[in-house]
Image: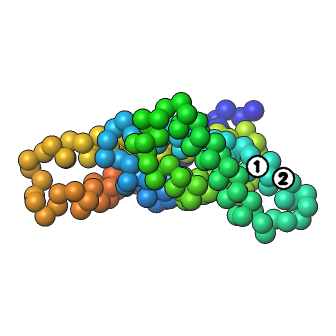
Amino acid sequence: MDWTNLLSISLGAILINNFILVQFLGCCPFLGVSKKMDTAVGMGFAVIFVMGLASAFCYVVNLLLVALDLEFMQTVAFILVIAALVQFVEMFLQKMIPSLYEALGVYLPLITTNCAVLGVALLNVQENYNFIESVVYGITGGVGFLLAIVLFASIRERLAVSAETPKCFEGFPIALITAGLMALAFSGFSGLQVW
């Protein structure tokens, strides 16, 4: 196993090609759940779990589709796998952590249609990653999502209590400006090269 390749995939998923701030995939839960730090962390870990498992299951499903010469069904098959995984996460949270389940609200089922989760499965196929690389890319892509949403939530919590924000920018406008500035900051990682 080539550890430098896995490190390169990991740093790429977390910083260089962050799903939220560089590829702009999965912005709906990013903007919707990032008002409080605890819900942002909960959503981040749910996305890590779903992206990691989706990468593993979609890799196996893709092998089956290729063997049956049904590659054109990839997107539909991947969406079905992701929907099943999200349903599992939703039932688990409802049973085990009802407060987080309530706090995430409608955004938890939205992981099913989260472009980042589907994007990681499709990018695994496009990049021709093996099983280990696919799972590492899925998990570290979720870590990148967690990093972005936690940073964003911490900034939004501070802005909510700040008296310095002009009245016309309060609420969602300042959140969009903040997200844009964070995306600009993350674009600085684009020149980073790993071995």
Quadrant location, the N terminus: top right
Find residue 44 and report its horizontal and vertical position in percent: 47, 41
Q: Residue at x 17, y 57 (%)?
A: 170
Compared across the picture, whether 166 is left or right of 84 comes to left
Find residue 24 and report its horizontal and vertical position in percent: 46, 60
Q: Residue at x 10, y 60 (%)?
A: 167
Find residue 133 and report its horizontal and vertical position in percent: 70, 42
Crowding around mark 1 (Cα neighbors within 10 Å: few <14, some 14 to 19, many 20+) is many
* Residue corresponding to mark 1: 59
Quadrant location, the C terminus: top right
Dot 2 falls on a residue whose secondary structure is helix
Compared across the picture, whether 189 is left or right of 156 comes to right
Q: Amino acid at mark 1?
A: Tyr
Note whether residue 120 is visible: yes
- The front one of 165 and 133 is 165
Q: Is residue 119 above or below residue 96?
A: below
As drawn, which residue projects farthest toward the top? Answer: 96
Q: Residue at x 78, y 66 (%)?
A: 73
Q: Is residue 109 above or below residue 91?
A: below
* Residue corresponding to mark 2: 63
Contact check, label 2 and label 1, Cβ < 8 Å: yes
Crowding around mark 2 (Cα neighbors within 10 Å: few <14, some 14 to 19, many 20+) is some
As drawn, which residue projects farthest toward the right? Answer: 68
Quadrant of res 56: top right
Q: Residue at x 22, y 57 (%)?
A: 171
- Spatial separation of the CA atoms under disc 2 and disc 1: 6 Å
Dot 1 falls on a residue whose secondary structure is helix
